[in-house]
Every structure is written in structure tokens, then in C-alpha cells.
Image (cartoon, rainbow, N blue to C red):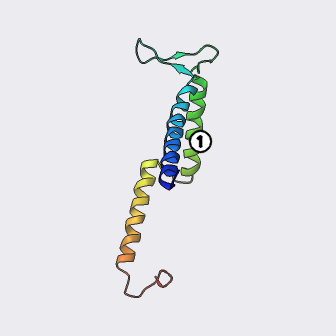
Amino acid sequence: MGKRGLGGLSALVLSLGFLAGGAAPGLAVGVLPNEGGDAAIVRPGVAPIAPEEDGLQRLSDLDQAFIAARTAGDNTLSIDEAGHLRGDAADSANKTIRNAPAGASFSSL
């Protein structure tokens, strides 16, 4: 077998390996398709995940606490106000850089 035959054989083996590797993850699915619509049928032995109302409320509370910790201070800001002020600061910085004299550096401004 020459170089060409060996290269062709290795390409064939590699291609078959990719095909087998692409098909294998499909076997690890824990849900069976349902012919009656979009709802899935859970396989036997797999417990369905029930929505937790307490968990949703806790996540909402944690989110509010996270935002409040970053917007806390004497003048609390909403996310919209903080974004607007950040945009104004960026515009001001860009104007300062554009209007700087030739040869100026950040340390000389």
C-alpha cells in the first residue's frame, strides 16, 4: 500500500469515526419524542423537574439584592440612569481625547 492508499484509508477511518461520534450523543437523551405535540414524555426512572415558586421568588430577591448593592449610595440610581450617566462619561472622555493638543499624553491632560 503506497502513501496515497494509506492516506485514503486513514481519511476513511477518520470520517467513520466522526460519523459514529456524532451519532453517539443522540443516545444519551433522557426524553422521548411525543407524537401528540411539543410536550415531552419522560423516560421511566427519570424524575421530572417541577417548577418551584419559592425558588423563583428567591432568585428574584437575590437579583434585586445584587442590583441594589451596586446602585446603593446617597443617590440610588436605576439601571437606566446608571447607563445614561455612563454614556455621558464616555462621550466626555472621547471629546477630551479628540480636543487634546498634538503630542499630549494622558498624564499631561
Q: Is residue 55 above or below residue 89?
A: above
Picture coordinates of residue 109, whole percent (x, y):
46, 82
Is residue 79 something one can see in this rendering? yes
Residue extending farthest to the front is 1
Of 70 and 5, nearer the camera is 5
Q: Position of 22 compared to 95: left or right?
A: right
Amino acid, disc 1: Ala
Crowd rating for badge 1 (residues with CA inside 10 Å; few <14, some 14–19, many 20+): few
Residue 61 location in percent, x, y? 58, 35
69 or 101: nearer the viewer = 101
Q: Position of residue 55 (x, y in %)?
A: 60, 27
State the SS at label 1: helix
Establish if 9 lies above or below 99: above
Q: Reply above or below: 27 against 39.
A: below
**Could you say which is closer to the camera, residue 85 or residue 106?**
106
Q: Is residue 19 above or below residue 54?
A: below
In the picture as drawn, the residue positioned furthest to the bottom comes out as 103
Which residue does the image show at 49% across and 17% down from the upper left?
A: 40
| Residue at point 62%, 18% (across, down) | 46
Task: Name the residue that disc number 1 marks.
Answer: 65
Q: Residue at x 40, y 55 (%)?
A: 84
Report the front residue among 65 and 11: 11
Single out the residue that lies furthest toward the top: 36
